[in-house]
Image (cartoon, grey):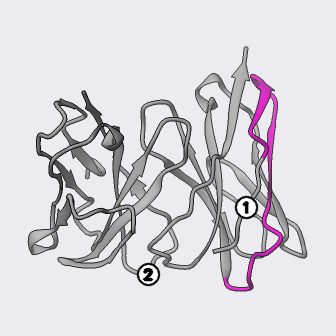
Amino acid sequence: DAKTTQPPSMDCAEGRAANLPCNHSTISGNEYVYWYRQIHSQGPQYIIHGLKNNETNEMASLIITEDRKSSTLILPHATLRDTAVYYCIAGSRGDYKLSFGAGTTVTVRA
Amino acid sequence: DTGVSQNPRHKITKRGQNVTFRCDPISEHNRLYWYRQTLGQGPEFLTYFQNEAQLEKSRLLSDRFSAERPKGSFSTLEIQRTEQGDSAMYLCASSPTGGDYGYTFGSGTRLTVV
């Protein structure tokens, strides 16, 4: 699986958009970009995934650059409950083994 | 469906004792995974099952660890002769076969070896 690089931490104001970057410069053509988050003392929660096109669901939007070497997860209106560690993972469809890095610790402040 | 259920949520044991954790996946999911997470780190893959067959085991899974999934339903993870280094959160997840919808994780079992 391709390695991903994320900033270790970031702060965000409540009600504002949170933009979480991820670099995956060695991603291969059949690898998706997956995002999970982990709220304290809970298991990771799947957020969204994409291959080439931008994706949106009820939780977030995923913007993937045309060369697929980086992506941005957007939380449109961050709330205090969005405070969590966010993991960006590159993996093939149906991969049975996810390689989590250290993720980005996002703190949403009132 | 209530999602992936793990029991117990917390376990404190003395070094050298055996412990067993249970995971009940989402009923229609035929893939089941175990991960381990230590403080400040992301989860690390331990093993996975396709129905009742254990198809891969990580090198992290020493001989003291054994996982089963009888009848392809719930799974158990047993650690024999626990060591302090086994202290961690043990996470279970499930998914449909070949799906790209992401895993559903349980809340984990936190093991503390004293």
* B46 with respect to B99 (left or right): left
Report, in whole angstroms, how far the alpha carbon at label 1 lies from the one at label 2. Answer: 23 Å
Residue B34 placement: quadrant: bottom left
Location of the C terminus of chain B (image quadrant): top left
User: Which region of the structure is painted magenta?
Assistant: A7-30
Residue A32 is one of the magenta-drawn residues: no
Residue corresponding to mark 2: B98
Q: Where is residue B52 shown, x and y percent of the image?
A: 17, 77
Residue corresponding to mark 1: A4
- Which is closer to the viewer, label 1 or label 2? 1
Q: Is residue B107 visible?
A: no
Q: Are marks 1 and 2 in contact (CB under 8 Å)?
A: no
The answer to whether B96 is drawn above or below residue B27 in the figure is below
The chain containing the residue under callout 1 comes to A
Q: Where is residue B39 shown, x and y percent of the image?
A: 49, 35
What amino acid type is highlighted by mark number 2? Gly
Secondary structure of residue under mark 2: loop
Secondary structure of residue under mark 1: loop
Q: Where is residue A90 shown, x and y percent of the image?
A: 66, 68
Of B51 and B18, the residue lying toward us: B18
The chain containing the residue under callout 2 comes to B
Q: Is residue A53 visible?
A: yes
Label 1 crowd bin: few (<14), some (14–19), many (20+), radius 10 Å:
many
